[in-house]
């Protein structure tokens, strides 16, 4: 009887990116750029910067699993090995999004619990957020769309994976390479949107977050957002 064997390379080595890998540093660069110009007291700025760096922890681990899923020998692995790799990828992506991204935003002074609450409480929690932040209705609409399109189903899948493991009711397990790439894109794209949106309102007035390539994903080799001085923004808009 052959025992279970799963070889996972050292994380440091697997953090080297190939041409088909996601650029996991992109959300981190965006968050660090915002942290550089945050208009808060020094102690809070240090906390924001610290939690910007924590974004990379989970994305580095997610990249490791993603590379193994996309490797040429992936189909040679047994079912248990494949399941372990998908579980590792999705656990880290969900922790990045629900935990690390939320922590970064909270440290800037926002309460975004409504973004991750259960469906039955979303209307109540989002209304409470709007009562405190009446000019931010657009972010409620954006998050409602994300919840409807992918977040609720993916979150439920994570609950099943972490508890019962019972997918017999039709809960998605997302165990295909195509799902792995799609969710990497979706989660990082949503994270970048939230980081840029909430961060832009906490930055010094002379600095802006500009979306320069709206369709760019972490699999493209160009930035979706850039941070620039208001003088540069005004000059560009006059052209």
Image (cartoon, grey):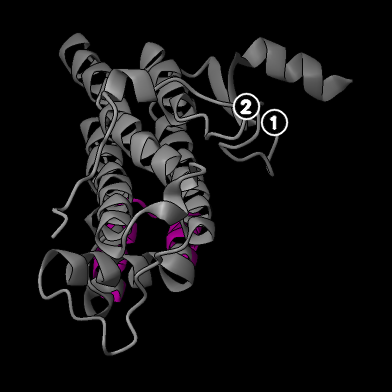
**Residue 10 placement, left or right of 68:** left
Q: Could you tell me what secondary structure mostly forms the magenta stretch? A: helix
One can see residue 144 in this view: no
Q: Quadrant of the N terminus?
A: bottom left
Determine crowd level at label 2: few under 14, some 14-19, many 20+ residues with C-alpha closer than 10 A.
some
Magenta highlight on residue 58: no
Residue range in magenta is: 123-145
**CB within 8 Å, label 1 to label 2:** yes
Outermost residue toward the left? 163
Q: Where does label 2 land, which residue?
A: 223
Outermost residue toward the bottom? 169
Residue 54 location (% of width, % of height): 24, 26
Residue 237 location (% of width, % of height): 80, 24
Q: Residue at x 35, y 41 (%)?
A: 65
Q: Is residue 81 above or below residue 205?
A: below
Residue 204 location (% of width, % of height): 44, 17
**Residue 183 placement, left or right of 38:** right
Determine crowd level at label 1: few under 14, some 14-19, many 20+ residues with C-alpha closer than 10 A.
few
Residue 201 location (% of width, % of height): 43, 33
**Residue 55 placement, left or right of 147:** left
């Amino acid at each position: 009887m052959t025992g279970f064997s799963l070889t996972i390379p050292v994380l440091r080595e697997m953090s080297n990116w190939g041409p088909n890998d996601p650029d996991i540093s992109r959300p981190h660069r965006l968050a660090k750029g915002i942290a550089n110009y945050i208009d808060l007291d020094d102690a809070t700025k240090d906390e924001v910067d610290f939690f910007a760096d924590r974004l990379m922890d989970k994305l580095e681990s997610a990249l490791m699993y993603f590379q193994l899923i996309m490797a040429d020998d992936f189909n040679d692995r047994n079912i248990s090995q494949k399941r372990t790799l998908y579980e590792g990828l999705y656990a880290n992506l969900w922790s990045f999004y629900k935990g690390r991204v939320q922590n970064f935003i909270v440290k800037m002074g926002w309460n975004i619990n409504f973004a991750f609450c259960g469906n039955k409480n979303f209307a109540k929690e989002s209304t409470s957020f709007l009562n405190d932040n009446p000019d931010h209705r657009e972010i409620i609409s954006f998050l409602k769309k994300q919840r409807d399109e992918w977040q609720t189903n993916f979150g439920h899948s994570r609950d099943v994976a972490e508890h019962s493991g019972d997918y017999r009711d039709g809960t998605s397990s997302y165990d295909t390479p195509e799902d792995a790439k799609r969710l990497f894109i979706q989660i990082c794209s949503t994270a970048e949107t939230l980081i840029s949106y909430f961060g832009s309102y906490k930055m010094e007035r002379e600095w802006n977050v500009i979306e320069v390539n709206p369709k760019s994903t972490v699999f493209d080799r160009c930035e979706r957002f850039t941070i620039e001085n208001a003088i540069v923004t005004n000059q560009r808009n006059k052209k």
